[in-house]
Image (tube, rainbow, N blue to C red):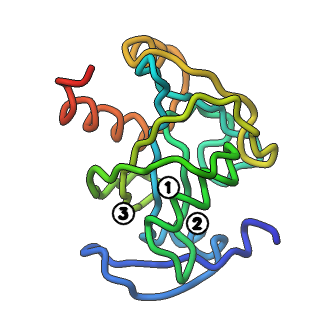
Amino acid sequence: MNPADEIVLIVDERNQEVAQVSRRVMREGCLIHRACYILVFNRRQEIFVQRRTMSKDIYPGYLDVATGGVVLAGESYELSAKRELTEELGVRKAVLARHFDFYHEADNNRVWGRVFSCMAEGPFVLQPEEVEDGFFLGVDAVQLMAATEQFTPDGLMVLKRFMAENEAIF
């Protein structure tokens, strides 16, 4: 199926379900939708950074600190997170820790997100349609890199909040 034809869940400003439409209609109308964000760490507490393919419908070619994506109609955040981990990285048995929900709004993106994290070492089987490449990097190095490279703004916001709420770990 063409990703633009996937049926996604549309929500309102309070994250209440209101409709189900194609991804294409969601993007064209900048409709509020749900998405899952999974921060993938290794044992050295480095985060997996992936480069999005140029065919992505939003932020093509950008670096992203989160694996994840749009919640499809009929899915929970948790099911979406498990599906996205399997599709994008080939990770099937990771234990997901739930962290927080948030609302993010940019010119071309309005999303209610739920953040998860997991531990996975790789090697990963990257989904060629969505992930061009990826690598583990220390969180401090990610923050330095973000000053000169294009990262997804919602992903950086998620990482900043995650780090603030878990500073004792890092």
Q: Which residue is mark 2?
A: 27
Instruction: Please state which of residues 45 and 105 is positioned toward the viewer in this rendering.
Output: 45
Query: Which residue type does callout 1 highlight?
Result: Asn
Q: Amino acid at mark 2?
A: Arg
State if disc 1 and disc 3 touch (CB < 8 Å): no
Q: Amino acid at mark 3?
A: Trp
Within 10 Å of the Cα at label 1, are there few (<14), some (14-19), or many (20+) other Cα atoms? Answer: few
Q: Position of residue 31 (x, y in %)?
A: 47, 72
Could you tell me which secondary element the residue under label 2 belongs to?
A: helix
Task: Measure the alpha-carbon separation of dots 2 and 3.
Answer: 14 Å
Nearest to viewer (mark 2 / mark 3) = 3
Q: Which residue is mark 3?
A: 112
- Mark 3 neighbour density, 10 Å: few (under 14) some (14–19) many (20 or more): many
Is 160 placed left or right of 138 in the picture?
Answer: left
CB-based contact (under 8 Å), mark 2 and mark 3: no
* Residue with the mark numbered 1: 108
Cβ–Cβ under 8 Å for marks 2 and 1: yes
Q: Residue at x 32, y 53 (%)?
A: 98
Q: Is 95 above or below relative to 138? A: below
Out of 81 and 42, give the one closest to the viewer.
Answer: 42
10 Å neighbourhood of mark 2: few (<14), some, or many (≥20)? Answer: some
In the rendered image, residue 46, in percent from the top left (x then y), is placed at 46, 20
Earlier sequence position, callout 2 versus callout 3: 2
Horizontal and vertical percent for residue 39? 45, 39
Lower sequence index among marks 2 and 1: 2
- Cα gap from disc 2 to disc 1, whole angstroms: 8 Å
Residue drawn at (19%, 25%) of the image: 167
